[in-house]
Amino acid sequence: MHDQAPLLSVRNLTVSFPSLHASVPAVRNVTFDVGKEKVGIIGESGSGKSTTGRALMRLLPKSTRITADRLDFQGEAVLSLSDRRMREIRGHSMAMILQDPKYSLNPVMTVGEQIAETVILHEKLSRKLARERTLQMLESVHIRDPQRVMGLYPHEVSGGMGQRIMISMMLITKPALIIADEPTSALDVSVRQQVLSVLDELVTANDMGLVFISHDLNLVRSFCDRVIIMYAGRVVEELAASELDNATHPYTRGLLEALPSLTHPKDRLAVLKRDPTWVEA
């Protein structure tokens, strides 16, 4: 996969949520590594992909039970770190881009203040230097007139610009690993492509690792290097994005066959037939 040690190494990650009568596992025995590459995690709603992403950053409620034989990020055992050390890592070495910037940005702070605050907090920069870095960062995500945009409040920017602001906020400290949870699903198709190319550009230029969580198989196929397919809390298949058409698991095959195609139009798309044994496998 890659020559150097992976940035992130996960072995048998299991995440359970407490319910009234028992503990319900949402993620079961998930194992994967991520290096300086783009890894897609694909699955339907409820497959455990977002829960996996949040578990990596310890962003789940305190009552959640997270166990793993190994969950190492840059050589540190994430599950045994203090809350304080975890806060230092979060937003500095490991960052998360969420689905809808409207809910992630502070409505009462200007865009510029919010991005600058990240570097002031993590890198102890002066306000003047933080402001310069913010301007550079907004330029690097292709925002025209960054000087003007810095003075805007989140409700004054469009969805696509909001998501680029979110990306600049998460990448300003040059983290080693980014976890992007459906970062383009709230955007329309034309803007989606722009945001993805910005993300791709920054990840490549800064030699980062990216975990890209999505339910969109075609998008991940074109954007990522490798794909992990999850079903009912488990990893059912893992392969290079370019090899996706050679997938062997019936669930992955079912997802592929359910995709519309312009080159091979079908009268009726296939309906995924599920097998109870996939959960036990």
Image (spheres, rainbow, N blue to C red):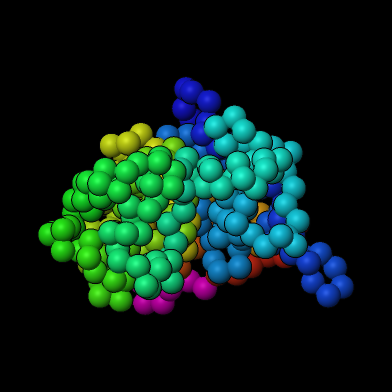
Position of residue 61 in the picture relative to residue 171 (left or right): right
Q: Is residue 198 above or below residue 188?
A: above
Q: State the predominant SS element of the stretch in magenta.
A: loop
Q: Could you tell me how many numbered marks the image carries? A: 0
Front residue of 49/217: it is 49
Q: Is residue 189 above or below residue 13?
A: below
Front residue of 77/86: it is 86
Front residue of 60/41: it is 60
> At which x and y percent is residue 227?
48, 47
Q: Is residue 183 above or below residue 39?
A: below
> At which x and y percent is residue 240?
45, 41
Residue reaching furthest right? 21
Identify the residue at horizontal 62%, vertical 33% (top origin).
76
Position of residue 240 in the picture relative to residue 198 (left or right): right
Residue 251 appearing in the image: no
Q: Is 261 a magenta residue? A: no
Residue reaching furthest top? 3
Identify the residue at horizontal 55%, vertical 32% (top origin).
74
* Quarter-of-image position of residue 54: bottom right
Identify the residue at horizontal 15%, vertical 63% (top origin).
148
> At which x and y percent is residue 10?
63, 40
Q: Is 270 a magenta residue? A: yes
Identify the residue at horizontal 43%, vertical 47% (top origin).
121
Q: Is residue 189 above or below residue 256?
A: below
* Quarter-of-image position of residue 250: bottom right
> At which x and y percent is residue 46?
61, 68
Residue 131 appearing in the image: yes
* Quarter-of-image position of residue 257: bottom left
Please give the range of residues in magenta.
265-271
Front residue of 130/229: it is 130
